[in-house]
Image (spheres, rainbow, N blue to C red):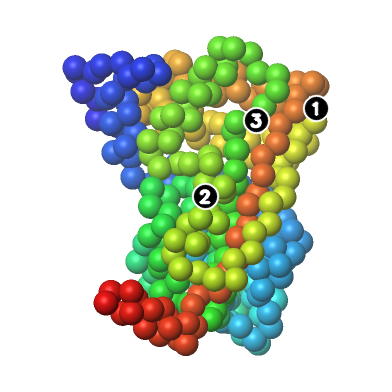
Amino acid sequence: MLRKSATKTRRGSSSSQLLAARDHSGYIMESKYEVSRLEKKTDPQLAWRQLAWAGLRPGMRALEVGCGSGAVTRVMERIVVAGHAIGVDQSADRIKAARTLARKANLGVRFKLGNAYALPVGDGKFDFAWSRFLFEYLRHPERALRELIRVTKPGGIISVADLDGQLEQFYPLDRSLKRDLTEALRLLGATGFDPHLGRKLFTMFQIAGLHNIRVKAAPYQVYAGPMKSADLANWRLKSENSGRLLARLTGDTKRWMSFSERFMRVFERSDLFYHCTMIHVSARSPTRALMSRKLVFAKTADR
Ligand SMILES: C[S@@+](CC[C@H](N)C(=O)[O-])C[C@H]1O[C@@H](n2cnc3c(N)ncnc32)[C@H](O)[C@@H]1O
């Protein structure tokens, strides 16, 4: 919704545009192509290595929150073997597709429709609760982390992986495109999207009272020169989607559709360098003994 009496903020976007972005509720990558985008971009071997590093083992009951098409949940099911893996996502379309894809792969993995802020599962049900590429889109990631903790057994594993520096580290980038990209990130930021979420995870885990926190940072999406056609298709969808959303939020279709096209041309440059980082944090939820010790300490400290 745009206000008539819009005032320009210091960095360019009008106050009404920022308000419209703040009013936006939902996943900014939403599109009819999202299932196929997620299936194409997921590397099951990388997911396997990440899940193993996080501590997923055979026999565990495991949960993925924001599972999308279920590409990673299917890998989880293969690792837990005789255990159980469950995926939760807020999109009915993606849950339906995830069920079909798992059935085709002959896997008994289950999928539930639900929200990361109020998971449709009981307390302490899982040995392993995991979320990847979700927190960066959430307005309240710390609330989603609290839910992961709630559904994990005392002493169980909680693991979150997300990006840091996404959409930021391009070189070379011409001045007008840089200006538009900064503005785009500012508007998307008001919807809840946080390109710096990765660097915040360790502190978020500490504040949440998790222990044995381990952190791993790895390069993700490193492009030197024109990118491969599969990556290009993924970025095209991301770029067109963001362009459409920004046009809707600002009412300026011409600017943002042109931005989306100019942005895609960056990826065709032979001299382009781009990179971002995947930050992966894994920790244990407090055991009952630790929780009661903390309680005793809290009582002592009160006196
Ligand atoms: C980028 S996909 C991540 C897919 C998968 N986890 C992976 O690693 O590739 C993000 C998914 O999170 C879901 N999502 C976004 N907000 C959510 C919320 N509040 N609760 C549950 N799922 C959410 C979206 O519907 C989307 O399917």
Residue extending furthest toward the front: 303
Give x and y (percent) for residue 277.
67, 44
Q: Earlier in the sequence, mark 2 or mark 1?
A: 2
| Residue bearing the label numbered 2 | 200
| Residue at 56% over, 36% down | 238
| Residue bearing the label numbered 3 | 169
Give x and y (percent) for residue 224.
80, 31
Give x and y (percent) for residue 29.
49, 43
Q: On screen, 39 above or below 220?
A: below
Residue type indicated by callout 3? Gln
Residue type indicated by callout 1? Gly
- Which mark's residue is nearer the viewer, 1 or 3? 3
Q: On screen, 9 above or below 114?
A: above
Q: Secondary structure at mark 3?
A: loop
For residue 116, side relative to residue 278 (left or right): left
Q: Quick one: quadrant of the C terminus?
A: bottom left
- The answer as to whether callout 2 falls within 8 Å of ligand 1 is no
Q: Residues within 10 Å of mark 1 (few under 14, many from 20)?
A: some
Q: On screen, 218 above or below 302?
A: above
Q: CA distance from mark 1 to mark 3?
A: 14 Å
- Which mark's residue is nearer the viewer, 2 or 3? 2
For residue 8, side relative to residue 236 (left or right): left
> For residue 300, what is the image quadrant?
bottom left
- Which mark's residue is nearer the viewer, 2 or 1? 2
Residue 153 in view, yes or no: no
Mark number displayed over residue 225: 1
Residue 246 in view, yes or no: yes
